[in-house]
Amino acid sequence: MYIGDTLGRRAIYTPDRLAVVDAGKPQRPHYTYRQMNERANRFANWLRDEVGIAKGDRIGIIAHDGVEFLDAFYACGKLGAILACYNWRMHWRELAQVIADTTPRLLIFSDEFRDKVAALLPESPSVTHTLHIEGEGISGSRRFEDALQSGDPTPVTNETVTEKDIVALIFTGGTTGLPKGAQISHRMIGWNTLNTVIHDILPGDTTVNVFPMFHTGGLLVYTAPLMIVGGTVILVRRFDPELVLNLIQEYRADFFAGVPTMYQMLTQAPNWAEADLSSLRFCTSGGAPLPVTLVEQFQREKGVRFKQGFGMTEFGPGIFALAPEDAIRKAGSIGRPNFFVDARVVDDHNRPLPPGEVGELVLKGPSICSGYFNLPGALDEVIDDEGWFHTGDLARYDEEWYFYIVDRKKDMFISGGENVYPAEIEQALYRHPAVHQCAVIGVPDPRWGEVGKACVVLRPGASATEDELLAFLREHLAGYKVPKSVVFLDTLPISAAGKILKRELRERFAGG
């Protein structure tokens, strides 16, 4: 055995334990660790024998969550190859650019994305083989399951693979150019698993994963660690609140992770009132501050306790954890750094700041990624001479070493010479009983430079006016922080990971 063959080890230790439930498929297939390991061996042999995949080669995937995503991931681990996890939300021209940069030999795709794949293939000469997961595919593509089952089940070994080798590429947002592929090593996964076991999960736990696996939240936050310790991962194609509540209840999930928008949607699901969530030891929220009202509602109506978390594609992804007992006492905090993570808050001159002062969050530890694919030195630009990784997040910490994300540097705006942090305003807005979702952005203003605009989605059946919400905020915030306008929307733009896309809102309301 060598580093990276998670399923090979698990098939020895717990061969008959349930590993994966593919709840996104109508027949909802179940797989034990023995079966998952056999599938990974078959696919690894097929990749090597039919496609010629060797150590360091890339295979790409544009697919919804399903067992096939994990087949590809663990087959790459056995071979020493690299799974490039492409964001299916991208336009085909953007995908073609990323594929040209990462040069995969094989492309796996869900039928829903067949048109994108057909459009980009003429511009992707590196791709010599294509596999479709369902449907009819495209000209020249082969059915994934047929390819996998034609592979030899003999165990695959590559003794040259070490903890430094890369097993996956997870792509950053790409808001300022081509998305960068963070190189995920076996070392990073191992250290993140250790942090996750210390702070969150127990061997044999079960969870429902609702994050897309092209995202660090889907593949690395809980799925990879849980499969290392022998737990069960239930996969869904897309976040469906009613289905998720049913799966938590049916499989007696031990924990669940989501972002605040997902938790809000769960409370609006038609089966919320009767859903039995008593099996949950905790829920984890990340991506944005969790409104206290939601914490209180889950506790009051379902007896569920929350942990707040914080992670990044390039680091962790498990970086901070707030224990359930602190969810109310330390509301808004991301908690303390995980065991093998160090953290500081520094000023613009990289000097550590005392408790209560706002500055940039910097991190140090072994669960950092191994740079960006095809961009040597790019990660070094955000790592200082002492080895601290600069996150671009504005934060503070209190006297008890609990950290608080104030905002992203790029989300902060300056109004009349004062720094304004939208996250603080959003937390105040969520206290209003009519507000279901909200996002605050800075828009141009001839007098103040920039002023706030609150984009609000009201709760079903609730009503509120612009004047009412602004008056409510004046009761909770300093005058310069109160937005100058409120716009009511039916929905907010949401990413595949469930985060509100403020960039789209800024583009939409750039004129003020």
Image: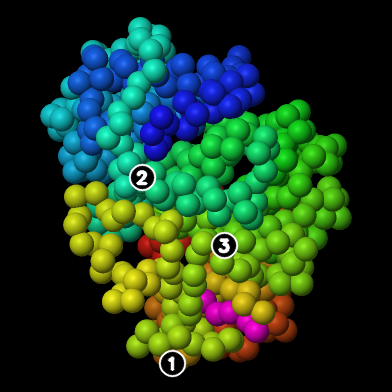
Task: Give the magenta part as a residue range.
Answer: 392-399
Structural distance between the alpha carbons of marks 3 and 1: 39 Å
Scheme of image coloration:
rainbow
Rendered location of residue 209, percent (x, y): 59, 38
Q: Nearer the viewer, mark 3 or mark 1?
A: 3
Where the C terminus falls, by quadrant?
Answer: bottom left
Q: Which residue is mark 1?
A: 417
Q: Residue at point 57% right, 62% down?
A: 338
Whole-angstrom CA distance, mark 3 to mark 2, is: 20 Å
Residue depicted at 55% across the width and 54% down the height: 195
Report, in whole angstroms, how far the alpha carbon at label 1 lies from the one at label 2: 48 Å
Along the polypeptide, which appears first: circle 3 or circle 1? 3
| Res 242 quadrant in image | top right
What residue is drawn where x is 33% and y is 51%? 182
Residue ID for mark 3: 339
- From the viewer's perspective, is the residue at label 1 or at label 2 nearer? 2
Question: Looking at the image, which is closer to me, 136 or 473?
Answer: 136
Residue position marked by numbered label 2 in the rendering: 163
